[in-house]
Image (spheres, rainbow, N blue to C red):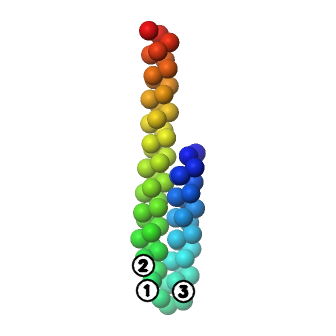
Amino acid sequence: MPRLAVFALVVCALAVAAAVVSFVAGSWLGIVWILMAGVSSNMAWFYLRKAKLDKARTSTGQSAATAG
């Protein structure tokens, strides 16, 4: 798993926890934390997909190089 994806997932989990704490405390600031969780989860998904595509390109490039 790419390091940036792991960091984004950690930020997402912490943002969700902060949102829960904020809403329990009666603060509407939790909306900002929910938005941050959404952005960080999208970043994690992006980096995971990018790593998967890079791996597929690398394996395809290596097999084409060895065959030609």
Q: Decide: marks 1, 2 in contact (CB < 8 A)?
A: yes
Q: Quadrant of the N terminus?
A: top right
The residue at 49%/90% (across/down) is: 26
Q: Quadrant of the C terminus?
A: top left
Q: Earlier in the sequence, mark 3 or mark 2?
A: 3
Give how far apart the Cα atoms at labels 3 and 2 are.
12 Å
The residue under label 1 is 28
The residue under label 3 is 24
**Which of the 4 quarters of the picture holds residue 18?**
bottom right
Q: Amino acid at mark 2?
A: Ile
**Which of the 4 quarters of the picture holds residue 60?**
top left
Q: Secondary structure at mark 2?
A: helix
Q: Amino acid at mark 1?
A: Trp
Give how far apart the Cα atoms at labels 1 and 2 are.
6 Å
Residue furthest bottom in the image: 26
The residue at 43%/76% (across/down) is: 32
Q: Secondary structure at mark 1?
A: loop
**Labels 3, 2: front one:** 2
Badge 3 crowding class, 10 Å Cα cut-off, few under 14, some 14 to 19, many 20 or more, is: few
The residue under label 2 is 31
Q: Which mark is residue 63?
A: none
Q: Position of residue 27 (x, y in %)?
A: 47, 88
